[in-house]
Image (tube, grey):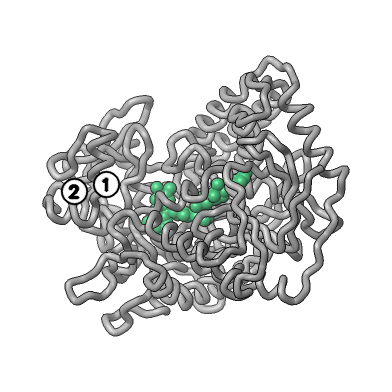
């Protein structure tokens, strides 16, 4: 068993992971020795795809306020967000924008030189700071450049983490499959930050790249940490048909319209005040209603769609503010949005739930923290507002980074990695999965899983359908026991990686449907046709799902309501 030891391990090099690495470096004057792990190359973390902007209160003198940002977030969350978490978030976000400015992000500017902010869904003030429509790319670049000033980190690129090893109730090590060498090794650390991103690939029609498979959630879940609110999966209103590539909400922030097959701006029926800039759960449901009632356009493979119309914005605005959107439409659809409307429909986008943490991002295991999309400190509740996620990654990268630095500086111990746990994990993968000769193809199981999630856990759900979905998952799990991985080699075995990911996805899909079935109400991203109303009496609570080895276990945790009592949401 080869062990490499660091003070701190960071699993994931997206915005959350890099921001935390920078904070730890600053707070320890570059003395903490950090290992940063990514299953792809550092700058290929999915955060580079973030397009539209990062939300923060930057112009109080023009009418914005912390209270307004907090209220928008809480109302947008359908009152499931923890309000103390929201309050902390809105107060910290503006400094993150200013820090990134100093670290090199070329924010788009107004005529007067101030950082430009555009409107985003559910926000009652233009709050999205942006670098055209390539915000995540520039933020990642600035953070990585800043980290390079410190010589205290080691990169583990293209290393796939498979399990968290515990020594009693403490984290001891992370097992890694190093793809280019084929080696299986363990990284030890006094503290671990899980910043491994979302799980969009649970669905077939998604904005996320193939690598976003919820590995961190699944590893934590199997290590005994609960998943909080997994049933709240966000459908973004504008994924292009048929690929699912995102048309940023910035398109509607810049003034884009949504039109049905009659050419009507149908949002006036559903959200007469905010129209296309209502929160995503409401816009996605409205689009699906239009499509289901026959006012959409027929699309391939059942992907019926409606139109995103930017034609009235004009070439100059589109070229300046939405250049990537134009490029994507031309390359992937053969459509120039300056002249033609874009076919779009709701698309699986963001996981509001994740690994349960406290307000500092610390999990129930003393030396494990989580930040970014993988975590759930209950900022987004049942529905996230656009541009609050990249801001969240920065804020909780900062918070967890500073907490971990404090912990390590205070003399945190290093736990011993239990040799048997390592060997067991090695056997599971290289003796079991890799060598077994079954009759099932893991790629087909993955496809079937993604299709069933599209069908049984979509924008609209109901009890019978979710129950059917759970039955299908149970059968896929059985079939998975009998797989063959065709490539038997150790070096860069992507078949093996995909099988490991699929195993993770099966567990997470089950947790999502399990919590969804039990939540007999409609709230935010969880819209049930058999329980169409929100039920605060029974379900103003966070779902907590724990792994048992057989069916998951479910309990509920109260929501922190420090300021606003739930009211009806109208936009
Ligand atoms: C197309 C698109 C556009 C978006 N635009 C916006 C926007 O404009 N504004 C906004 O606020 N939000 C936006 N979002 C959401 C936001 O970008 C993400 O929620 C956020 O970037 C997630 O960052 P993260 O640091 O949590 O994870 P990621 O950036 O996904 O990074 C995850 C890291 O974990 C690593 N990893 C995962 N599993 C393993 C494993 N098993 N072993 C080793 N490493 C692993 C990955 O390699 C990667 O380095 C957008 C999302 C999409 C899909």
Q: Position of residue 506 (x, y in %)?
A: 63, 36
- Compared with residue 475, is residue 106 higher up or lower down, i.e. above or below? below
> In terms of image quadrants, where is residue 52?
bottom left
Residue farthest bottom in this picture: 61
Query: In this rendering, does residue 174 appear at all?
Result: yes
- Residue beneath disc 1: 325
Rendered residue at 39%/75% (across/down): 98
SS assignment at label 2: loop
Query: In this rendering, does residue 533 appear at all?
Result: no
Callout 1 touching callout 2 (CB < 8 Å):
yes
The quadrant of the rendering that contains the N terminus is top right
Instruction: Give the CA separation, mark 1 to mark 2.
Output: 11 Å
Q: Nearer the viewer, residue 117 or 291?
A: 117
Residue density around tag 2, few if under 14, some if 14–19, many if 20 or more, within 10 Å:
many
Q: Position of residue 228 (x, y in %)?
A: 63, 56
Q: How many marks?
A: 2
SS assignment at label 1: helix
Q: Is mark 2 within 8 Å of ligand 1?
A: no
Rendered residue at 83%/38% (across/down): 424
Report the side of 20 relative to 422 (left or right). left
Q: Which mark is residue 533?
A: none
- Residue beneath disc 2: 310
Rendered residue at 35%/47% (across/down): 237
Residue farthest top in this picture: 439
Q: Position of residue 319 (x, y in %)?
A: 18, 52
The quadrant of the rendering that contains the C terminus is bottom left
Q: Nearer the viewer, residue 359 or 469?
A: 359
């Amino acid at each position: 068993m080869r062990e490499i030891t660091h003070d701190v391990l960071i699993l994931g090099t997206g915005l959350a992971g890099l921001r935390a690495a920078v904070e730890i470096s600053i707070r320890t004057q570059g003395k903490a020795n950090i290992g940063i792990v990514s299953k792809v190359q550092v700058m290929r973390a999915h955060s580079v795809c973030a397009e539209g902007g990062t939300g923060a209160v930057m112009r109080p003198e023009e009418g914005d306020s912390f209270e307004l940002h907090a209220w928008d977030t809480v109302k947008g969350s359908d009152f499931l967000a923890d309000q103390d978490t929201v309050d902390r978030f809105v107060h910290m976000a503006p400094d993150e924008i200013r820090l990134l400015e100093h670290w090199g992000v070329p924010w788009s500017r107004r005529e007067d030189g101030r950082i430009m902010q555009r409107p985003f869904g559910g926000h009652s003030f233009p709050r999205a700071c942006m670098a055209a429509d390539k915000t995540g790319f520039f933020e990642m670049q600035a953070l990585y450049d800043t980290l390079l000033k410190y010589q205290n980190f080691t990169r583990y690129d293209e290393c796939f983490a498979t399990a968290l090893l515990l020594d009693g109730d403490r984290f001891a090590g992370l097992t890694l499959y190093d793809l280019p060498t084929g080696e299986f090794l363990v990284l030890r650390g006094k503290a671990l930050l899980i910043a491994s991103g979302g799980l969009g690939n649970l669905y077939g029609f998604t904005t996320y790249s193939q690598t976003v498979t919820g590995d961190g959630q699944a590893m934590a879940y199997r290590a005994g940490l609960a998943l909080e609110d997994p049933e709240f999966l966000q459908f973004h209103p504008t994924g292009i048909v048929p690929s699912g590539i995102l048309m940023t909400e910035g398109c509607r922030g810049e003034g884009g319209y949504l039109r049905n097959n009659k050419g009507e701006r149908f949002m006036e029926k559903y959200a007469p005040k905010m129209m296309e800039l209502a929160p995503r759960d409401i816009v996605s449901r409205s689009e699906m209603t239009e499509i289901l009632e026959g006012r959409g356009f027929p699309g391939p493979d059942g992907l019926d769609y409606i139109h995103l119309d930017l034609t009235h914005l004009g070439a100059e605005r589109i070229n300046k503010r939405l250049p990537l959107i134009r490029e994507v439409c031309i390359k992937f659809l053969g459509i120039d949005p300056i002249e033609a409307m874009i076919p779009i429909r709701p698309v699986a986008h963001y996981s509001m739930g994740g690994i349960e943490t406290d307000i500092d991002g610390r999990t129930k295991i003393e030396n494990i923290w989580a930040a970014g999309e993988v975590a759930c400190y209950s900022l987004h509740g049942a529905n996230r507002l656009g541009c609050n996620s990249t801001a969240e990654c920065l804020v909780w990268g900062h918070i967890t980074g500073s907490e971990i630095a404090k912990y390590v500086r205070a003399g945190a111990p290093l736990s011993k990695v239990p040799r048997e746990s390592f060997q067991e994990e090695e056997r599971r993968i290289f003796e079991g999965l890799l060598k077994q000769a079954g009759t099932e193809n893991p790629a087909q199981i993955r496809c079937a899983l993604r299709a069933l999630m599209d069908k049984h856990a979509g924008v609209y759900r109901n009890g019978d359908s979710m129950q059917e979905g759970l039955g299908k998952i149970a059968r896929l799990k059985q079939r998975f026991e009998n797989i063959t991985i065709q490539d038997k080699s150790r070096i860069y075995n992507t078949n093996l990686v995909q099988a490991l990911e699929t195993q993770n996805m099966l567990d997470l899909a089950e947790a999502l449907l399990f919590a969804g079935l039990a939540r007999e109400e409609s709230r935010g991203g969880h819209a049930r046709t058999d329980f169409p109303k929100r039920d605060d009496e029974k379900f103003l609570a966070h779902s907590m799902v724990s792994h048992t080895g057989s069916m998951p276990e479910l309990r509920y945790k109260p929501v922190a309501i420090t300021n606003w009592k739930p009211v009806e949401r109208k936009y």
